[in-house]
């Protein structure tokens, strides 16, 4: 049985971890980094770049570089979240046929699931390389705020990557797991998670290794990127005041400003002042313009205060939902790279009236927790039971368009609830069951999940029949609803599989496309290997030939020199067949060269 990897699929960065022999650890990617940017770049030649390499080329290729796909996953194009995202995304977002927000790169449309699938596949391959064995199972984390559609979309992204997603778990739950295992903590804990794109606050209770999420709240549109943008806007303003040039509409400049803003922000977590230098950022009639600015901690704090303040209401909401006061909390855990900003840490201390804990690396703690969950499922880690919650209430529509809540939000899953209902008119033989998700008392303001009818109820005066309705949510969030007429025992039921917007056929299609690409990638890798070999051979033959030219006759020398020129042409052409032919010919000639060297007296002397 293979290992189950844990993946923190972040808005800005991902982290993949594994637990071996009860010890969770981070799996470095092929470049040796412990986190991988959640970025996919599409080059002019149709190559797909993922991670650091994609992020690096984003400056020169901003329109064809997809980052923060997590902001769009499971979202409708017309939805407020997508519309807000459009402000920060330089690539094109378009409505799909079903109204979902998709990403347009040149003339091809990609669902956010497919983009996330490419990133997950990259992480899967890194894990396989590191572990030296195939990996097919994973735990993936999502923000606690994610609804069912977003969760299912994330699961689909895993399927696209060739991963069997064993569980989708909340990021703060994973973080608490990472801490709980290390410290065998008992008590109530707030997990304050401010990452690249989302903010989540969760209140958990940990008792003897049992984790229970008491409440969750957050803001899916607050994260490190907003902090970068605050600095970026300030840089644009300063530059305009200085030169009269507005960089806001220069996409190329904006990418450079964005990177510089993030770098400055990270530096300001440990130093009081930083310098931002961007040569040749623009030009006007008087020549090239350079950006040179100094940003100190207090100006930075002023810029980000409105963002930092936005973390407070969700924290109070979460405390209220858990029916707790700050004094009831034993610990506050910091998660997410953005929590390294000192003003954030001050705010956390102000809200919760205690210093936060960040013993583990905040960028890695979620991935570590996911790997621990994998080990729990495999049976490698015992004595821990993980309870998860349903993020939204579930209910059915009752008379007059009202909602009867069957399962309250934040209920631990798996869970079930049964309630007896009755008819509202005499001799009513059919009862419609309309399943809803949401917090409103009015059916029309909730999301409709499914409808079914219980028919052939024996005629009886209203209020007499007893219709037993049961809701059951399993540990994967799949909802089973059944209705039984107690007198006739007639039963009807439905299973609600959360849907991400992609049909199974579409997912299959995307997987095929990815395989095709993987074939192309393999071919390209082969070509690169052969080119490298030819390059090496040219280098060696050129040097040896120069050294031993005195021992070669005119014809041999000409042949060698001509072939070196040919090989260089083949390398420049990138045509596989030319590279191969040249490799063969030069290989033969290099053998001849070796023989000459073997038999020449000077080399023999050298061997003595
Ligand atoms: P995560 O989603 O946890 O990987 O967090 C990513 C966010 O953390 C990005 O916006 C980073 O810019 C931010 N971040 C990483 N390191 C630091 C740091 N030293 N100070 C402030 N923010 C940071």
Image (spheres, rainbow, N blue to C red):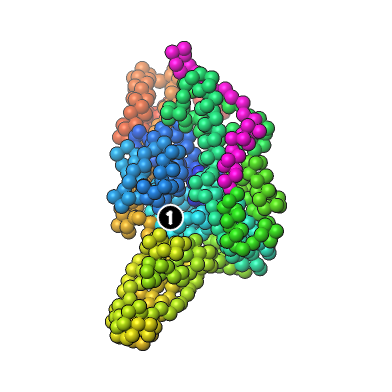
Q: Nearer the viewer, residue 303 or 272?
A: 303
Q: Nearer the viewer, residue 37 or 415?
A: 415
Q: Nearer the viewer, residue 315 or 142?
A: 315
Q: Nearer the viewer, residue 525 or 156?
A: 156
Quarter of image, res 273: top right
Q: Which residue is mark 1?
A: 150
**Place of residue 255 in the rendered image (x, y in percent of width and height, measured from the top left):** 47, 32
**Place of residue 402 in the rendered image (x, y in percent of width and height, measured from the top left):** 41, 67
**Eyeballing the image, is 30 above or below 483?**
above
Q: Check disc 1 and report its element: helix, strand or loop.
A: helix
Say whether mark 1 is within 8 Å of ligand 1.
no
Could you tell me if residue 380 is visible in this image?
no
Q: Which residues are magenta?
A: 283-311
| Residue at position x 55%, y 25% in the image | 238
**Place of residue 231 in the rendered image (x, y in percent of width and height, measured from the top left):** 55, 33
Which residue lies most toward the top here?
286
Residue 416 drawn in magenta: no
| Residue at position x 52%, y 50% in the image | 219
| Residue at position x 51%, y 33% in the image | 258
In the drawing, does residue 448 fall left or right of residue 131? left
């Amino acid at each position: 049985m293979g290992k189950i990897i844990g993946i923190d699929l972040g808005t800005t960065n991902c982290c993949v971890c594994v637990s071996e022999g009860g010890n969770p650890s981070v799996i470095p990617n092929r470049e040796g980094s412990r986190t991988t940017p959640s970025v996919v770049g599409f080059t002019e030649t149709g190559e797909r770049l993922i991670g650091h390499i994609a992020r690096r080329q984003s400056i020169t290729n901003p329109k064809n570089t997809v980052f923060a796909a997590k902001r769009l996953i499971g979202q409708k194009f017309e939805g407020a979240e997508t519309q807000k995202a459009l402000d920060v995304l330089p690539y094109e977002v378009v409505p799909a046929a079903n109204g979902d927000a998709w990403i347009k790169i040149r003339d091809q449309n990609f669902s956010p699931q497919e983009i996330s699938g490419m990133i997950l596949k990259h992480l899967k391959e890194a894990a396989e390389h590191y572990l030296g064995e195939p990996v097919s199972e994973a735990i993936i984390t999502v923000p606690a705020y994610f609804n069912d559609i977003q969760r299912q979309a994330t699961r689909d992204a895993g399927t696209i990557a060739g991963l069997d997603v064993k569980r989708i778990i909340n990021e703060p739950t994973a973080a608490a797991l990472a801490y709980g295992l290390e410290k065998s903590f008992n008590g109530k804990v707030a997990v304050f998670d401010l990452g690249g794109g989302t903010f989540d606050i969760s209140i958990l209770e940990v008792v003897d290794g049992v984790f229970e999420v008491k409440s969750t709240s957050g803001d899916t549109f607050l994260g490190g990127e907003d902090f970068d943008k605050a600095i970026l806007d300030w840089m644009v303003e300063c530059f305009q005041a200085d030169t009269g040039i507005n960089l806001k509409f220069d996409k190329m400049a904006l990418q450079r400003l964005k990177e510089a803003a993030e770098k400055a922000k990270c530096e300001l977590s440990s130093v009081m002042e930083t310098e931002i230098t961007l040569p040749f950022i623009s030009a006007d009639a008087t020549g090239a313009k350079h950006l040179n600015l100094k940003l100190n901690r207090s100006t930075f704090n002023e810029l980000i205060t409105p963002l930092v303040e936005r973390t407070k209401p969700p924290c109070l909401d979460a405390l209220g939902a858990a029916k707790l006061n700050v004094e009831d909390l034993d610990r506050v855990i910091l998660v997410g790279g953005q929590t390294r900003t000192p003003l954030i840490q001050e705010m956390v201390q102000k809200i919760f009236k205690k210093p936060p804990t960040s013993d583990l690396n905040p960028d890695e703690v979620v991935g570590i927790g996911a790997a621990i969950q994998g080990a729990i499922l495999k049976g490698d880690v015992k004595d821990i039971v993980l309870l998860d919650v349903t993020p939204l209430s579930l209910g059915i529509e009752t008379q007059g368009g009202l909602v009867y809540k069957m399962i309250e939000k934040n209920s631990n899953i798996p869970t079930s609830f049964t309630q007896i209902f009755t008819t509202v008119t005499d001799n009513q033989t059919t009862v419609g069951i309309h399943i809803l998700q949401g917090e409103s008392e009015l059916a029309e303001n909730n999301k409709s999940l499914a409808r079914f009818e219980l028919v052939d109820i024996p005629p009886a005066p209203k209020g007499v029949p007893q219709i037993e309705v049961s809701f059951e949510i399993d540990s994967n969030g799949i909802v089973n609803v059944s209705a039984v007429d107690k007198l006739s025992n007639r039963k009807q039921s439905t299973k609600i599989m959360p849907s991400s917007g992609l049909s199974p056929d579409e997912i299959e299609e995307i997987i095929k496309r990815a395989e095709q690409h993987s074939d192309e990638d393999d071919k390209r890798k082969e070509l690169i290997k052969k080119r490298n070999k030819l390059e090496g051979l040219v280098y060696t033959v050129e040097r040896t030939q120069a050294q031993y030219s005195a021992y070669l006759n005119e014809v041999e020398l000409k042949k060698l020199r001509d072939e070196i020129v040919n090989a260089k042409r083949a390398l420049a052409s990138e045509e596989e067949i030319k590279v191969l032919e040249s490799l063969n010919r030069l290989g033969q000639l290099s053998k001849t060269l070796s023989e000459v060297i073997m038999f020449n007296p000077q080399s023999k002397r050298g061997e003595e």
